[in-house]
Image (cartoon, helix red, strand yellow):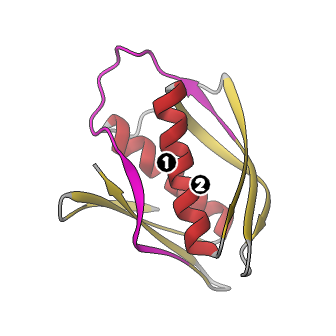
Amino acid sequence: MFRLSDHTGDFAIEAEAPTPEAALGELVRALVVLTLGEDEPLRSDASIALALEGFDAEDLVVNFGNELLFLFETERFLPSSLIVDRLELAPPRAHLEARLVGERLDRHRPLARPAKAVTHHEATFDVSPERTRARLVIDL
């Protein structure tokens, strides 16, 4: 489950899921909805491998969001799903190895909200045995 909300000139994404891996998947869905303006199905005809690191869980999730934006800007790639192969969140080094499956959009397709970057401002990735809650603020 995710929620999008205006945030003082930016946009905030809040995601919640039973596991950290599922929460990352919800962030993927939310960024796609933010970009396209709707939750529409995407093809699964392209795949990209990710290997990301961060100082801690929050830094890793910000890096993850920025990598998704980078892939869209450079390759017009939007993921339809995330397959997590390895996720480590313990400081001093958080690590993610995953595969994104999705499609490359036509360059002429209109977008709802072009995003510039995911910021560290108010970024959270809180993991408990019951739920994982994530929050990202996107600079539009």
Which residue is rendered at x = 25% and y = 58% of the image?
Answer: 10
Q: Position of residue 13 (x, y in %)?
A: 38, 61
Q: Residues within 10 Å of mark 2 (few under 14, many from 20)?
A: many
Q: Position of residue 18 (x, y in %)?
A: 62, 72
Relative depth, front residue between 131 and 73: 73
Which residue is rendered at x = 71% and y = 75% of the image?
Answer: 89
Say if 36 sits above or below 53 in the image: above
Looking at the rendered structure, the secondary structure element under dot 2 is: helix
Residue 11 placement: quadrant: bottom left
Numbered range of the magenta stretch:
100-125
Which residue, given by chain and number where applicable, does mark 2 sit on? Answer: 25
Residue at mark 1 to residue at mark 2: CA–CA distance: 6 Å
Amino acid type, label 1: Arg
Check contact, mark 1 vs mark 2: CB within 8 A.
yes
Q: Is residue 108 magenta?
A: yes
Looking at the rendered structure, the secondary structure element under dot 1 is: helix
Identify the mark at residue 29; answer none if there is no mark. Answer: 1
Q: Residues within 10 Å of mark 1 (few under 14, many from 20)?
A: many
